[in-house]
Amino acid sequence: MTCPFQIAMSVAVTLCVCACGGGSSQATGATHAALPSRPVELTLRTPDGQFLDLGDLRGQPTILFLFATFDALSQAAFHPVASFHRLHPEAHVVGLAAQPDGEELVAAYTEAMHVSFTVAYDPDNTVARGISGLGPIEAVPMFIALDENGYVVHEHVGYASEGQLERMLLIAEHMPIPSGPPAEDAPEASAPPSP
């Protein structure tokens, strides 16, 4: 005999599994959202007050790492991103706080995390509200690959291993992708921050 508690738990687990972000339409954890059809135009600000225009990064592929300072999975993702950054100087790596209070938290957070790559926030909060040139943000962490012309060519929602980041770089460089599953799959992404 099945008790009501077991039925309720089964339904809850099924709903959680079906509703989790990070679903994959490709082996690399691609999102289901349509990619923007023009180069991304977005001006960010670094903790030291400097402006960073994504258009200025054209000429080399860029990996955007969208995170939230309060999110544990985003914190875990910093390690593979830092390793990837050290191994791939041919690509820009930009951490972007995708949360409304980024200006207040990013400086202390990046110092505490000992971040080696560029970290910025969106001073207009268009990213957190889903109305920037990046489009809607499904969840954090989220990774967006821009090719050398600034076009979004791939998105990944959830934790990304160093191997998955390398695959994203190959996509951004318009190179063939090795067959086989991405390395080191990890937990799904957290719900996006509220603007």
Image (cartoon, rainbow, N blue to C red):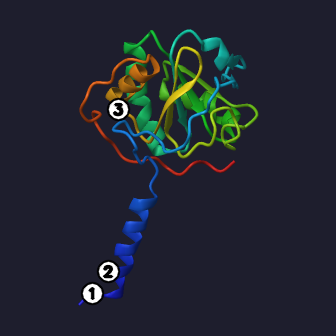
Q: Position of residue 167 (x, y in %)?
A: 36, 25
Q: Which residue lies at the image location 64% right of the left edge and 19% below the top edge? A: 54
Q: Quadrant of the N terminus?
A: bottom left
Q: Name the residue beneath numbered marker 2.
A: 6
Nearer to the camera, 193 or 154: 154
Mark 2: amino acid: Gln
Q: Are marks 3 and 1 in contact (CB under 8 Å)?
A: no
In this rendering, the count of numbered labels is 3
Mark 1: amino acid: Thr
Density class for disc 2 (Cα within 10 Å; few <14, some 14-19, many ≥20) is few
Mark 3: amino acid: Ser
- Label 3 element class: loop
Q: Which residue lies at the image location 33% right of the left edge and 42% below the top edge? A: 186
Whether residue 12 is situated above or below residue 151 in the rendered picture = below
Q: Which mark is residue 161?
A: 3
Nearer to the camera, 138 or 48: 138
Q: Are marks 2 and 1 in contact (CB under 8 Å)?
A: yes
Distance from the alpha carbon under mark 2 to that under mark 1: 6 Å
Q: Name the residue beneath numbered marker 1.
A: 2
Image quarter for residue 121? top right
Distance from the alpha carbon under mark 2 to that under mark 3: 35 Å
Looking at the image, which residue sits at the far bottom? 1
Whether residue 162 is situated above or below residue 28 in the rendered picture = above
Q: Earlier in the sequence, mark 3 or mark 1?
A: 1
Distance from the alpha carbon under mark 3 to that under mark 1: 40 Å
Looking at the image, which residue sits at the far front? 37
Q: Position of residue 117 (x, y in %)?
A: 51, 19
Q: Position of residue 152 (x, y in %)?
A: 55, 27
Relative to 101, 140 lies left or right: left
